[in-house]
Amino acid sequence: MWIRQNGLLCHTETKRVVSPADVGQPIYFENLGELYFSAADEVIKMSASEFDQFCLEYEKAL
């Protein structure tokens, strides 16, 4: 699950941290199950339902 902390998004299980201000817009490829960002060379594997939850937190963190 992704949560917001001080303007950052943190994954509760993997402890991965994403800064919405630095990575740009999220771009999700459902057929690959991969999330890319418009301004960063970063790929995150996730399900479509996890992406939906990520987007809710991402928009709040902006």
Image: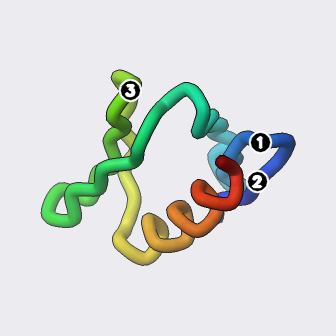
Disc with the residue nearer the chain's start (3 vs 1): 1
Residue type at tag 1: Gly
Label 3's element?
Answer: loop
Q: Return the mark for residue 7.
A: 1
Q: Distance between the residues labelled 3 and 2?
A: 20 Å
Residue type at tag 2: Arg
Q: How crowded is mark 3: few (under 14 residues within 10 Å), some or many (20 or more)?
A: few
Question: At 58% across and 68% down in the image, what residue appears?
Answer: 56
Q: Residues within 10 Å of mark 2 (few under 14, many from 20)?
A: some
- In the picture as drawn, the residue positioned furthest to the front comes out as 62
| Residue nearer the viewer, 26 or 48 | 26
Dot 2 corresponds to which residue?
A: 4
Question: At 70% across and 51% down in the image, what residue appears?
Answer: 61
Kindly indicate whether the residue at mark 1 contacts the one at mark 2 (C-beta within 8 angstroms): yes
- Name above or below for residue 11 compared with residue 38: below
- In the picture as drawn, the residue positioned furthest to the left comes out as 31
Q: In this figure, what is the number of numbered marks?
A: 3
Q: How far apart are marks 2 and 1 (CA)?
A: 6 Å
The image quarter containing residue 16 is top right
How far from the left and from the top, in percent, is residue 47?
A: 37, 67
How far from the left and from the top, in percent, is residue 26?
A: 39, 48
Quarter containing the N terminus: bottom right
Question: At 35% across and 72% down in the image, what residue appears?
Answer: 48
How far from the left and from the top, in percent, is residue 53?
A: 55, 71
Dot 3 corresponds to which residue?
A: 39
Disc with the residue nearer the chain's start (3 vs 2): 2
Q: Residues within 10 Å of mark 1 (few under 14, many from 20)?
A: some
Q: For marks 2 and 1, give the one nearer the viewer.
A: 1
The image quarter containing residue 32 is bottom left
Residue type at tag 3: Ala
Label 1's element?
Answer: loop
Label 2's element?
Answer: strand
